[in-house]
């Protein structure tokens, strides 16, 4: 285990102790994950899929606007949302397709599996985030990986021809969104079976990468209050399912480390 990972794990524990204002009680969270006890790897993935794909409410693409106003609300300025890659605060009302506005960034690029904006993967709040229109365009459908020069539109982010490296504050958020999607979507209901691989091939298959970078990012940037709160809002008010990797970041390695080999 690297020193960096040890520090990240210690920080995870500390963040858990210090988390305040999140309505989910430990007892309720344990109940949600009943059936996962003692499981790891593929068996844990299957159990989590059954939990997070059952009793889910799907939203229309139009309903996503209003929901993001709540899930990504700026705590210091309730009429605003916080955008994903740079943490900018923008008025919720300023959404649309103009270059001065924000729109709905599909963190799992919607061409990777061609689900578009269909109910389900295309409208799943667990991977949809507000982002400035020019940044959304520059990220495009690139895979995630470390490297490249600074992005033109997004300070603190890096990009090259085949990949996007988010700012340090949201690297873990991005990783956990991707891992959620891979477990949530297993090809049921006519939807795609999304999977993470170690490539940055930027193709249209139902895959995204790069797994090794995403594993590192999950360890380096543990869930904070903002990320936990948004999981709670999605669960209690919109979709009624959770991102298990925000509640249990350690499950990422259990399920996905094996996929790398
Ligand atoms: Ca690259
Ligand atoms: Ca973070
Ligand atoms: Ca899958």
Image: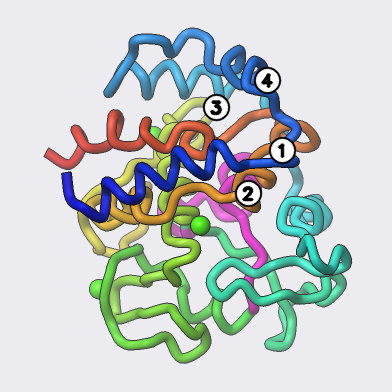
The N terminus: image quadrant: top left
What colour scheme governs how the chains and residues are painted in the rendered image of this protein?
A: rainbow
**Which span is picked out in magenta?**
109-132
Distance from the alpha carbon under mark 4 to that under mark 1:
22 Å
Indicate the position of residue 161 as horizontal and vertical percent values. 29, 80
Residue 242 shows up from this direction:
yes
Indicate the position of residue 39 as horizontal and vertical percent values. 33, 13
Nearest to N terminus: mark 4 or mark 2: 4
Residue 58 shows up from this direction:
no
Mark 2 = which residue? Answer: 225
Question: Do the numbered discs 4 and 1 sit on residues whose CB atoms are within 8 Å?
Answer: no
Distance from the alpha carbon under mark 3 to that under mark 2:
33 Å
Nearest to N terminus: mark 2 or mark 1: 1
Mark 4 = which residue? Answer: 55
Question: Do the numbered discs 2 and 1 sit on residues whose CB atoms are within 8 Å?
Answer: yes
Nearest to N terminus: mark 3 or mark 2: 3
Nearest to N terminus: mark 4 or mark 1: 1
Q: Of circles 4 and 3, which is in front?
A: 4
Q: Is mark 1 within 8 Å of ligand 2?
A: no
Question: Which residue is rendered at x = 64% and y = 29% of the image?
Answer: 241
- Picture layout, residue 61 above or below residue 140: above
- Picture layout, residue 80 above or below residue 250: below
Mark 3 = which residue? Answer: 189
Q: Residue furthest bottom?
A: 152
Q: Check if residue 171 falls in the magenta segment.
A: no
């Amino acid at each position: 285990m690297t020193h960096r990972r040890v520090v990240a794990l210690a920080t995870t524990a500390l963040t858990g102790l210090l988390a305040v204002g999140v309505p989910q009680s430990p007892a309720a969270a344990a109940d949600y994950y009943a059936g996962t006890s003692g499981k790891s790897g593929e068996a844990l993935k299957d159990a989590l899929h059954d939990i997070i794909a059952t009793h889910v409410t799907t939203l229309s693409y139009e309903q996503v606007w209003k929901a993001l106003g709540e899930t990504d609300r700026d705590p210091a300025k309730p009429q605003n949302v916080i955008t994903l890659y740079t943490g900018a605060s923008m008025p919720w009302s300023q959404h649309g397709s103009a270059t001065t506005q924000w729109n709905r960034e599909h963190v799992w690029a919607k061409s990777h599996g061609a689900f578009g904006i269909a109910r389900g993967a295309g409208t799943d709040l667990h991977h949809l985030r507000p982002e400035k229109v020019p940044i959304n365009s520059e990220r495009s459908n690139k895979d995630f990986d470390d490297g490249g020069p600074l992005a033109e539109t997004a300070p603190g982010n890096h990009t090259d021809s085949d990949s996007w490296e988010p700012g340090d504050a949201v690297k873990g958020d991005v990783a956990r969104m991707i891992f959620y999607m891979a477990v949530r979507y297993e090809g049921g209901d006519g939807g795609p079976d999304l999977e993470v691989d170690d490539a940055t091939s930027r193709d249209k298959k139902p895959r995204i990468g790069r797994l090794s970078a995403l594993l590192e990012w999950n360890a380096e940037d543990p869930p904070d209050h903002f990320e936990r709160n948004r999981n709670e809002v999605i669960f209690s008010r919109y979709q009624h399912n959770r991102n298990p990797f925000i509640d249990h970041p350690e499950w990422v390695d259990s399920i996905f480390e094996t996929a790398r080999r």
